[in-house]
Image: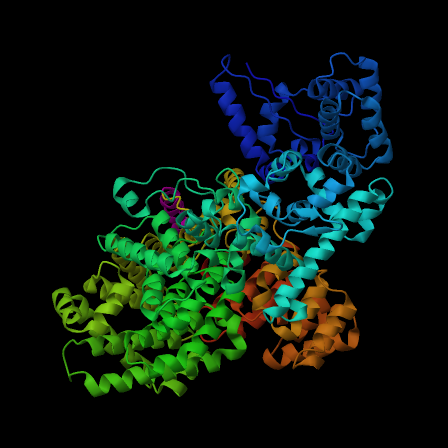
Amino acid sequence: MIRLLLSSTIEPGAYAETTQAAAAAASAALEELLKFAEENRGQVLVLAVIPDDLYNALDGEVKKRAERYVLPLDLRDAEFLTEIIYEYSGCRKTPREKLRILAEKIAQLDGGYTLAARYAGLWLRDNGCKVESVERAVEEAKREPRVFFAHYIWHVLLRGSGDLARKVAVPPLLHAVFGPVPVGVTYVTKAVYHGVWRFLKPEELEDASLESLREEALEPIAKWLAQQHEDLVEEALRDLASLNGEETKKPYKKALSDLIKALDWARGEVLKEGAETLAKLGVPEEGRISAVALLAFVVRRLAAVFKSGEVRGCWRRAAFIAGFALAGYLVLPTTKPPEHVAEVLGDVSESCAVDDYLAIDGVMPPLSIGVAQLMSIRELNMLTPYTDAEIIKATKKTAERLLARWRRGDITLAEAIYALGLAALAAGGEVDGETADLLLYAASSAVQWVAYPRAVLPVLAALRSLGEKAPHSYVSLLATVSELRTLDQETVWYLYDALQQLRSRLLEAERFWPLVEAVAAYSNLLRKYSAYIWDRRGEAVADMCQLYSEIRRRSAATAPGSGLSAHRLFDTTARARVLAVALESDDLARHVQRYCGIGDLEREVEAVRSVLDEAAAHPEELSEIAKSDADYAEWVERRNVTGNAGGVVENVSAWFKYVLARYKLVHALDEKGELDEKKLEEAAEDFEKEADMQRKLKQLENYMTARSLALRARILAAKSWGELLERAKGFQELWKEAEKHPDLIAEYLATAAGRLSEYLVYLAASGDKEMAEELLKKLRQLLDYRPEVSVATRLMLRLLGVGEGARLKEVVDVFESLILPEFRPAISMLAGRLQRDRALEECAKLFKTELCVNAVAAAAGDRVTTEILRSVIEKVVAGARPLLDRADGRTLVEVLTPISSAAQLVFMLLAAVEGRADAIRLHGLLGSVAYGDNVNQPLFRTVYKNCDDLNNEGCRLALLKLYYYHF
């Protein structure tokens, strides 16, 4: 038997964030419940509570199936609210009429009434069923539910005591900013009264245990603050903590003045201490943000407590937790590791005294992750108490044991993250170069296991001090990071700056292989992330070429004239990296040829390919070279922990062939500048060979990427909509394969998001819109893992009749780094991110101030500056005047804004979704001349020629080809 209760008046905001997150997939979730209930009819009772807005938004078929089970219910009904109060309060002797009167008053709140009824019941249970005090709180709330919940916090949690509020004023602030607070943090951040209220100083906590800090009155508060509460309750706490602005505190001030005074006092004291701490560390005043000050306040006290006996003995567990926090994992592993792994890990997966301060039931709250991210500052490294010589020696020994086990060919997530934690621990102390080298080497594998791209930067920062002692190992780490596919702009800038700072030391060192690694890092940044360092790309190429020239100089002096040798392999590997940059774009090729002295690219490519093929064909000889050359052997181990020299060269060879196949795809044009079907097929075949090679090397992500590109190459050659869909069928098989490997690491998720996006678009284009809609709702979180892919895909899907697309603000938010600086203020103003006066202030900071000011004015509708922007485009594109005359300021700004063809396409898709045919054609016309001699030209040109009618098959075909080419 099944019963579905679908409520009609409850607000989503009344429930926890997890419910709100699930709301996006309401249709899919309800369909699963329906299926489960119908399959287990008579054996299970299923209850689903759904608000009106979600119910009305359900998919038609799901809604139709659910209708016969619906029981509409007004959750504002006084009888219903009375029952909630009665059940939660346990007030069996209280007259129902008194509870009903309370319920009627709660029903007058502006939302959140069922939640308020629950809390009213809990309040009555706590105060011995004294209805009057709860009634008074409801009345004083003046219809605002958040004020009522603030009363609950004050009267029930804090007992209406100003002294108790001051004692625990910091933990509520921490909860308001970061979310749940570990129990131990509540006790180490408490205040004490000795004539005046003050916080316990770090030095007063050095010999303290959690038991010595516990107070009976604080127990329920500590437990409550360690939990995530309903949205309205959390918002009330944020109001009280002044996080939503001073205006939001006004409704609370009269009745809850003592609570507000306590929180204001605590915030002032914490920010004052934090500012003093950060000032001593040389942090400029504008960088002393309140969240960091709060974290610094907590870290100083945690570091003091970690010196005590009970927690000091948990240093291995602390390192384990810190590693997972840095890598972005929220849940600590609880399963017992296999016996061969446990030999090295020991009991680090078992809880210890340190968990009380960093975890909540095996889960790390954002507060703990924030604390871990401060480990890059030695004075704010919570693990500093564990950095004496004995523990550092033990971390080195553990790292040696981990590496010894990995050389047998098996690395687990727990081990990699533990190695990261050990390195981060040691980075807070004094280590010698050998130890730093070993710990960085062991930790380098962890960057490929991070949970999400934004976690990479805190990892690099936390290990930076080790890099000062072992720059060669740190450069190897930077090279490994640069290979990741989804780095954000800040991380790319960090990588580039770190490479610049280490370059001179690498050039002076005797080691050969770190130069090769540095060249690889520069190459990856220039090929994958050049938009992030657009104004410094010439400088970056020059830096790379300086390193490459040193490699060539050393190779020429020592390498034999022919045959394989360590130095010849180093030279070839570095040259492959340099050539890859030149093959990426004509602009980069000019810089490479200028600074690296490379002439005929085709001849250079053939020479590199020849050496790599020869080397890959003689793995035994490579092993002998590694045995006789320590420098080469060390590089091989950095690239392959098992020391497989043949495997390293095979990987380099496979990667270079991928670069060449991609170059062939990008330049698959005939003499007339049109797409060349034969060249596209050759590129597809090359990608298929690459996929086979990557499968052999067990590189799953690279294998799927190569297969995808083979499909995309053939899609570009399609001459009709039907032919394109027939060729795109392969995306379904590829997605099914991706589903079999749900690894929660950044690189795999990035790959899976790509496979999902191309399959979703195929479904929509082939007419299976219902399946596409369902899959989009179900797996939106995975798609959003790569925001730029998500935005482009949702716009393409909207154009095909699926989903809601994306708005200009989201496009600008996601593609901001691919927008020319001089147009950023104008497009931000159009997106509602900036007011006009603020946009003009931003223009004043730029080199091209006049163009920026003109763009802002044009975006605001000024005719004179709009004509100026038209002339800017007309200088680039002949014959554009008819379209330009019909283009408004917004269109002109959007057309001129992008740095890359991918960003141009996204703005074009946005125009298509909004039905702006002239804007689409103008994008197409400019794109056909702006992005070099490659397949972008005919693809954008086809859009220009065909998209005067958006329903034209030629237009849709061109847009779909552009989408598959770019995303």
Q: Is residue 450 shown to the viewer in this render?
A: yes
The percent coordinates of residue 689 (x first, y second) are 26, 59
Q: In this view, does 452 lie to the left or right of 882?
A: left
Which residue ends up furthest to the front in the rendered image? 195
Tell me if residue 51 is in the magenta stretch.
no
Instruction: Identify which residue, 334 or 688, lies in the foreground.
Output: 334
Q: In this view, does 304 lie to the left or right of 910?
A: left
Tell me if residue 739 is in the magenta stretch.
yes
Q: Is residue 670 shown to the viewer in this render?
A: no
Residue at horizontal 28%, vertical 67%?
652
Residue at horizontal 25%, vertical 52%?
405
Residue at horizontal 52%, vertical 54%?
303
Vertical placement of residue 833 versus 195, above or below: below
Where does the N terminus fall, quadrant-wise? Answer: top right
Residue at horizontal 48%, vertical 45%?
354
Q: How many marks?
A: 0
The percent coordinates of residue 912 (x first, y second) are 62, 57
Give the main secondary structure, helix, strand or loop, of the magenta stretch: helix
Q: Is residue 843 left or right of residue 686?
A: right
Image color mode: rainbow
Q: In this view, does 401 lie to the left or right of 259?
A: left
Vertical placement of residue 841 versus 343, above or below: below
The percent coordinates of residue 419 (x first, y second) are 36, 55
The percent coordinates of residue 239 (x first, y second) are 75, 46
- What segment carries the magenta color? 727-740
Instruction: Identify which residue, 434 or 828, lies in the foreground.
Output: 434
